[in-house]
Amino acid sequence: MLLAHDGSKHKGEAKPSEAKNISGVVMKYLEQGDKAPDFSLINQDGIELSMEQLKGSPVILTVIYTTCPDACPLVLHNRDKIQKTLEPAIGEGATFLGISADPVNDTPEILKEYITKLDLNPVKLHFLTGSTETIRKVLNDYRIRIRVDAEKGTVLGHSVMAYAIDADGIVQKAVEFAQ
């Protein structure tokens, strides 16, 4: 797993995060020091969860979908390594959030089954879903891109990245993983 860009500012200058995705489009993620946008989504247990509720705990936020054939399972199996890499910037004990890029198919029940299927430790792990409109807004607010088949409406891919957010709700790093 390689980091394409860590999103940190250099020598106090506001330098935009730039990481190229597969199509060569330059991505500009949230910057170090940006307030993490709030949202309210439903987790795998059917419980509403917001960034505001998580204040006081560091957060690692990424995007997933349960039918992803490659990147999502790889990122999730490396959750401990990702946390160890990002926690120096945000503190220990981070809550790991995976926002579904496919809310039509990723219901709370499906997300819960996915956690079990991948044999993930559910402690401080929330896979989140909501209406398509709400998910698209959250992904847009976090500048996470998804690719959707225009005819079928199915998710084809997404930014393979994570945000490290401190206990005050401030972005400390934005990292993109090589695929």
Image (cartoon, rainbow, N blue to C red):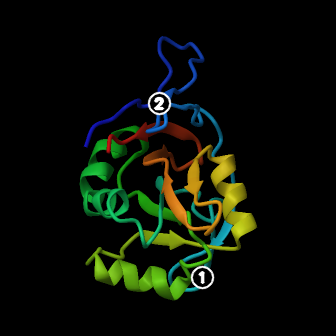
Residue 154 position, x and y percent, is: 56, 67
Q: Nearer the viewer, residue 9 or 106?
A: 106
105 in relation to 24, above or below: below
Q: Which amino acid, mark 2?
A: Ala
Residue 3 position, x and y percent, is: 33, 35
Q: Is residue 100 visible?
A: no
Q: Quadrant of the N terminus?
A: top left
- At 63% across and 36% down in the image, what residue appears? 34
Residue 150 is left or right of residue 32, and the answer is right
- At 44% across and 62% down in the image, what residue appears? 95
Residue 126 position, x and y percent, is: 47, 71
For disc 1, the neighbor class at 10 Å (few under 14, some 14 to 19, many from 20) is few
Residue that carries the numbered disc 2 in the rendered image: 19
87 in relation to 14, above or below: below
Q: Nearer the viewer, residue 173 or 162?
A: 162
Q: Quadrant of the C terminus?
A: top left
Task: State the CA–CA distance, disc 2 to disc 1.
Answer: 34 Å
For disc 2, the neighbor class at 10 Å (few under 14, some 14 to 19, many from 20) is many
Labelled disc at residue 7 = none
85 in relation to 40, above or below: above
Residue 174 is left or right of residue 75, and the answer is right
Labelled disc at residue 47 = 1
Do the residues bearing badges 2 and 1 touch, measured as CB atoms within 8 Å? no
Q: Is residue 2 visible?
A: yes
- At 41% across and 69% down in the image, what residue appears? 124
Q: Secondary structure at mark 1?
A: loop
Q: Secondary structure at mark 2?
A: strand
Q: Which amino acid, mark 1?
A: Ile
Q: Nearer the viewer, residue 84 or 69?
A: 69
Residue 118 position, x and y percent, is: 28, 76
